[in-house]
Image: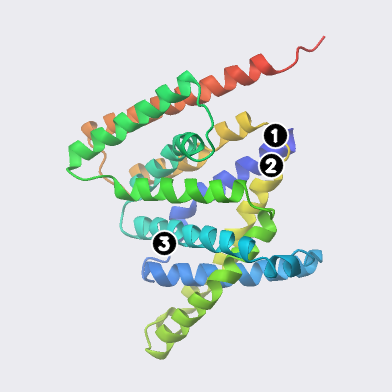
Amino acid sequence: MQPGIAYAALAYLVWGLFPIYFKLLAQVPSLEVVAHRTLWCMVFMLGLLTLLRRWAWLGPVLRSPKVLAAFAASALLLSVNWLTYVWAVQNDHVLDASLGYFINPLVNVALGYLVLHERPRFWQWVAVGLAAAGVLWLTVLTGKLPWVALLLAASFGVYGLLRKVASLGALEGLALETLLLTPLAAVAMLWWTSQGQSAFVQGETSTLLWLLLAGPLTALPLLLFAAGARRIPMTTLGLLQYISPSIQFMLGVWMYHEAMQPARLVGFALIWTALLVYSGESWLRSRQSSPAVS
């Protein structure tokens, strides 16, 4: 189990530090950052698949309109999630981004109920209710929905749902998603370059190098996560997932000095309480269902 915990924790650590990376690209428009992320991730994935000689899946997939349609939908959700996150970080909404990923596990519970007809347990409903109260409090406090957090949680939640029932693994799935997004990203990059507005024309060498790094930075945490998920119980994985938004929250408050008024903290506290209830219930249930060791 220990290597699995290390793999998953490292993946969440990298994801938690993403605000530092995207702040370094603050001079590049969010949409262009996502286009670069798509292109270089695709190049990295193609190289990795070639190195591992794992291309047998591609032929059957290309002959299956149903699979292609499913992954086109997941690719669209992934791009929405990426764009929202990059925009949030570049526009000083790191706390809102962290809130989205705090909410995400509870969105998964709601989606499981609505789409997969799963039956959440009592304390899971309590957790969802507390999180909803936190979102409502933040809405009343600011006079508007915390749309960044909700869009991040919803897009990643539905993306996870699609990938849960998908026919491809993490490596092949991400490769197909980036392949499907690449034509759009490439056309956009060619247009911006022809207009003299892209980082290729205006950016410094250091900026271009940081953009090139988007490929491995996108793919490697996902591969670490997949390796960890195969080796540890889902309950442990569920507890580790709070590493990422916790780091983002600390960066937002202490490194980027985003405003955290006491009244706003009440909304976060309600959501954190919901997560404690959800995680505690899952942990106790896993302990009760584990076979006794004689």
Q: Position of residue 214 (x, y in %)?
A: 54, 65
| 287 up-or-down from 23: above or below | above
Determine the residue positioned at 30% across, 29% down.
Answer: 133
The residue under label 2 is 228
10 Å crowding of disc 2: few (<14), some (14-19), many (20+) = many
Q: Is residue 130 left or right of residue 35?
A: left
Q: CA distance from mark 2 to mark 1?
A: 6 Å
Q: Secondary structure at mark 1?
A: loop
Determine the residue positioned at 53% across, 20% down.
Answer: 281
Determine the residue located farthest toward the bottom in the rendered image.
194
The residue under label 1 is 232
Please name whichever residue, 250 or 223, is drawn nearer the observer in this view of the structure.
223
Q: Earlier in the sequence, mark 2 or mark 3?
A: 3
| 101 up-or-down from 43: above or below | above
Q: Position of residue 287 (x, y in %)?
A: 65, 17
Q: Position of residue 138 (x, y in %)?
A: 25, 37
Q: CA distance from mark 1 to mark 3?
A: 31 Å
Looking at numbered disc 1 in the image, what kind of residue is underneath it?
Answer: Ile
Work out whether residue 292 can be spotted. Answer: yes
Work out whether residue 201 can be spotted. Answer: no
The residue under label 3 is 83
Q: Is residue 141 left or right of residue 107?
A: left
Q: Which mark is residue 8?
A: none
Where is the N terminus found, in terms of image quarters?
A: top right
Q: Earlier in the sequence, mark 1 or mark 3?
A: 3
Where is the C terminus found, in terms of image quarters?
A: top right
10 Å crowding of disc 3: few (<14), some (14-19), many (20+) = some
Determine the residue positioned at 62% across, 61% down.
Answer: 66
- Mark 2 touches mark 1? (CB < 8 Å): yes
